[in-house]
């Protein structure tokens, strides 16, 4: 994980940066899933500067060969007019490391009730009594608004940065380019 590539969103009067970043991220997720890629990570280097947003830059990490192979695929089709793609570059020596992981909130009482009904075999009324609407928890984290490719349901993928570390933590990344334990370079 010693190389990176930046993909910058171009300003667009018709689409918000959040909308374009969600579209870009969805395309990345699809190609990572198709390829079964676990060696490419993603970050949003401007997310700390944005208030509850991810900013206009997506940064991909990996070794040079997997990044080169990924960028040779036509996964950015339809996004070329909205993005500027940098060259593959070496991670700077002064980079620190941190995790970027998905956080799932128990924000939907309705979802929790459905799960309880399915897993515990309880009735809808009992589930409603156990999980009132007031049980909703909300996250104040940046997120991407995505649509599931399998169910078609829209959901928010909340992202949280871990603390800065001096040494990398190796590991694999999921099909979103995220990991609950492995770190990414941060600069």
Image: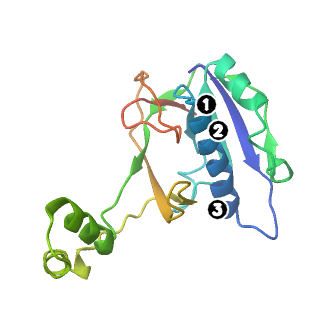
Residue that label 3 marks: 18
Q: Which residue is mark 1?
A: 35
Q: Position of residue 122 (x, y in %)?
A: 14, 70
Say which residue appears at 42% left-offset and 24% top-offset.
171
Q: Secondary structure at mark 2?
A: helix
Q: Residues within 10 Å of mark 2 (few under 14, many from 20)?
A: some
Q: CA distance from mark 3 to mark 2?
A: 20 Å
Q: Are marks 1 and 3 in contact (CB under 8 Å)?
A: no
Residue for point 76% across, 32% down? 73
- Reply above or below: 143 against 87: below
Helix, strand or loop under label 3: helix
**Position of residue 136 in the picture relative to residue 1 (left or right):** left
Give the residue pinned by disc 2: 31
Q: Nearer the viewer, mark 1 or mark 3?
A: 1
Q: CA distance from mark 2 to mark 1?
A: 6 Å
Q: Residues within 10 Å of mark 3 (few under 14, many from 20)?
A: some
Q: Nearer the viewer, residue 61 or 157?
A: 157
Q: Secondary structure at mark 1?
A: helix
Q: The N terminus appears in which quarter of the rendering? A: top right
Q: Residue furthest right?
A: 81
Asked if the residue under mark 1 is in contact with the one under mark 2, i.e. CB atoms within 8 Å, the reply is: yes
Left or right of 45 on screen, residue 124: left
Residue 94 percent location from the top left of the image? 56, 23
Against 16, is 74 above or below?
Answer: above
Residue at position x 54%, y 63% in the image = 152
Mark with earlier residue (3, 2):
3
Q: Quadrant of residue 169?
A: top left
């Amino acid at each position: 994980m010693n190389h990176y590539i930046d993909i910058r969103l171009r300003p667009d009067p018709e689409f918000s940066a959040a909308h374009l970043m969600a579209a870009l991220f969805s395309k990345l997720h699809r190609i990572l899933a198709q390829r079964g890629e676990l060696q490419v990570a993603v970050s949003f280097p401007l997310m700390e500067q944005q208030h509850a947003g991810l900013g206009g830059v997506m940064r991909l990490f990996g070794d040079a060969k997997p990044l080169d192979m990924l960028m040779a695929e036509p996964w950015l089709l339809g996004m070329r007019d909205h993005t500027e793609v940098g060259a593959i570059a070496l991670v700077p020596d002064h980079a620190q490391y941190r995790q970027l992981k998905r956080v799932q909130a128990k924000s939907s009482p309705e979802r929790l009730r459905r799960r309880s009904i399915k897993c515990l075999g309880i009735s809808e009324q009992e589930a409603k009594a156990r999980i009132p609407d007031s049980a909703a928890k909300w996250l104040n984290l940046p997120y991407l608004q995505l649509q599931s490719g399998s169910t078609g349901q829209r959901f928010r993928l909340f992202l949280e940065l871990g603390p800065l570390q001096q040494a990398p933590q190796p590991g694999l990344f999921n099909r979103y380019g995220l990991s609950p334990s492995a770190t990414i370079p941060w600069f």
